[in-house]
Image (cartoon, rainbow, N blue to C red):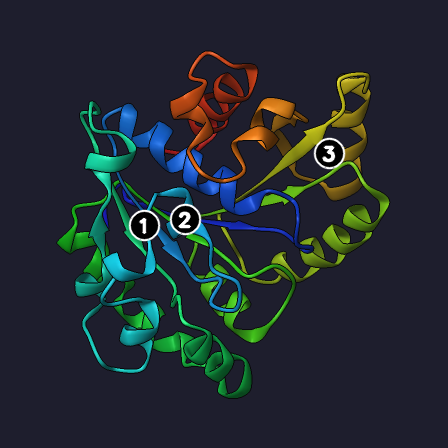
Amino acid sequence: MGSRKIVTVHSYRGGTGKSNLTANLAVCAAEQGKRVAVLDSDLQSPGVHVLFGYREGEIRLTLLDFLWGRAELRETAYDATPRVCPESTGRCYLVPASLTAEAITRVIENGYDIRRLNAHIDQLLTALDLDYLLIDTHPGLNKETLLATAISDVLLIVLRPDEQDYQGTAILKEVAGQLDIPHTFLVVNKVLSRADRDRLRARVQEAFGHEVIGMVPLSEEFAAIESRDLFVRRHPDHEISHTLRGILARWPT
């Protein structure tokens, strides 16, 4: 695979802003000339396609079609570059999760074979000539998430400065530690403006034993977009956008 990297973005609880961060990080990478794809493996509550401006009628094949043997993985990848970063020198692709209630219900009831995905990841990396594949996961711990995380070069754990997040992330960190992932980093999201960031960073790093490579401030501007656009496109010079580029700079190359 050479320098290609699989980056799994995960959180123990929902509501951390994980999917929004994943989508915006992908665009930052493409704007820096990288070839990147986002694979939405949150099959129970998909959302990255909304951030990338896709509607149900625009998407014919999804990750579920691959997992259920109806399509090749490459066929489920959409070149989103013209709509999310048309001026970039890189490329940005999306492998969307299923968008229909029927398919989501079937996943909840019957599950899926994540091992099929793991066996074909290298083919997707090669077919799209990717620098990065970002995997947006379903929050929490389940077999599918663990198997997807196990193939990662980088695990990015997103948490909020919240006691429930701390306790859940401690469990996640313990489990992830058994997967032999080369690099694990922490991103603290929705940090209050009045927070002592140095103290918060030190507390989180001491508690979880991994480096905090980004502290993303709580922002009304971010909330005001309501997932209808990508923040780094709307506000390229905002503190959040600079923070996301800083996170990307810390990934191994």
Instruction: Give coordinates of residue 50: x percent, y percent.
Output: 41, 48
**Counting residues from the N terminus, which is met first, the one under dot 1 or under dot 3?**
1
Please give the name of the residue rendered at 33% of the width and 54% of the height, measured from the top-left corner.
55
- Type of amino acid under label 3: Gln
Tag 1–tag 2 contact (CB < 8 Å): yes
The number of discs equals 3
Q: Name the image quarter holding residue 108.
A: bottom right
Residue where numbered disc 3 is placed:
205
Q: Nearer the viewer, residue 160 or 224?
A: 224
Where the C terminus falls, by quadrant?
Answer: top left
What residue is shown with label 1?
Answer: 54
Within 10 angstroms of label 2, few (less than 14), some, or many (20 or more) residues?
some
Q: Which mark is residue 50?
A: 2
The residues bearing labels 1 and 2 have C-alpha atoms spaced at a distance of 6 Å
Q: Is residue 135 visible?
A: yes
Pointer 2 or 3: first along the chain? 2
- Observer-nearest residue: 244 or 236? 236
Q: Give the amino acid type for the residue marked by disc 1 in the picture.
A: Tyr
